[in-house]
């Protein structure tokens, strides 16, 4: 399937540019409608979600990151994570179960695949992948750095990746490198 190849290229390029570290959180926003070439929220596809999910969990196994799947606007862009992730990061669980019509095909598929899924309202992810302009920025740490990928689409959906970095504070006199010699 072409979308699987597209996502594989995106993930490989992402790894080459900015390696996510073990135990970091990566938020995934995905409109399966956009992947299929339709307007967001109009033609969700469990089949597309399944193909993408398989690739994303391979990426998770390879890197050791925690995946967080963003729901659609009907669940206020809440996120599906594994209970272990919620506990490790002190995330508060909310009472919702995503379904394709309220949560989106990708998040609802992930919810059914994760062994111990929970839905959380907020997260501060270390990195993210936005497939189909789903607006993941609200779930990234404050200083997001866009990553320039050669593979700019998955199926028909535009894709963007980002990592985050610590805030630079202290002004023009501050030093941001390794510990300076004293």
Image (cartoon, helix red, strand yellow):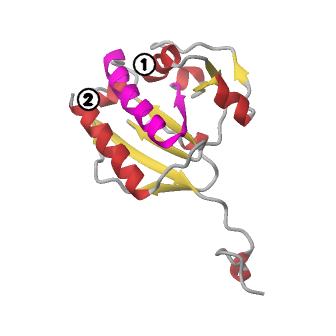
Which quarter shows the N terminus?
top left
In this rendering, the answer to whether 163 lies above or below 137 is: below
The answer to whether residue 17 is seen in the rendering is yes
Magenta includes 65?
yes
Q: Which residues are magenta?
A: 46-71
Q: Are there few (<14), some (14-19), or many (20+) residues within 10 Å of tag 2?
A: some
Give the residue displayed 21% in from the left and 32% down from the top: 2
Q: Which mark is residue 128?
A: none
Q: Quadrant of residue 148?
A: bottom left
Q: Residue at x 52, y 17 (%)?
A: 111
Q: Is residue 66 left or right of residue 179?
A: left
Above or below, 71 against 125 in this view is above
Q: Which residue is mark 1?
A: 105
> Furthest residue to the right?
182
Task: Residue at 27% x, 26% y: name it.
Answer: 36
Looking at the rendering, in which quadrant would you find the C terminus?
A: bottom right
Residue plotted at (53% across, 29% down): 70
Frontmost residue, 84 versus 95 = 84
Mark nearer the N terminus (2 vs 1)? 2
Q: What residue does disc 2 label?
A: 37
Q: Is residue 121 visible?
A: no
User: Please, is residue 20 above or below residue 50 in the view?
Assistant: below
Q: Is residue 161 shown in magenta?
A: no
- In this rendering, position of residue 178 left or right of residue 147: right
- In the rendered view, does 24 fall on the left or right side of 104? right
Q: Position of residue 163 (x, y in %)?
A: 52, 52
Magenta span: predominant SS is helix
Q: Quadrant of residue 58?
A: top left
């Amino acid at each position: 399937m072409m979308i699987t190849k597209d996502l594989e290229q995106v993930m490989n390029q992402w790894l080459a540019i900015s390696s996510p570290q073990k135990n970091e959180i990566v938020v995934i926003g995905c409109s399966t409608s956009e992947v299929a070439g339709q307007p967001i929220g109009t033609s969700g596809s469990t089949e597309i979600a399944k193909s993408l999910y398989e690739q994303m969990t391979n990426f998770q196994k390879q890197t050791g990151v925690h995946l967080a799947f963003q729901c659609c606007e009907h669940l206020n862009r809440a996120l599906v994570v594994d209970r272990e992730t919620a506990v490790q990061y002190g995330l508060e669980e909310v009472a919702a179960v995503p379904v394709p019509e309220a949560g989106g095909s990708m998040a609802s598929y992930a919810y059914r695949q994760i062994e111990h899924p929970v839905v959380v309202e907020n997260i501060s992810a270390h990195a993210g992948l936005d497939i189909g302009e789903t607006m993941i920025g609200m779930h990234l740490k404050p200083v997001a750095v866009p990553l320039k990928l050669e593979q700019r689409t998955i199926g028909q959906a535009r894709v963007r990746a980002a990592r985050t970095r610590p805030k630079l504070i202290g002004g023009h006199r501050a030093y941001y490198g390794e510990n300076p010699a004293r």
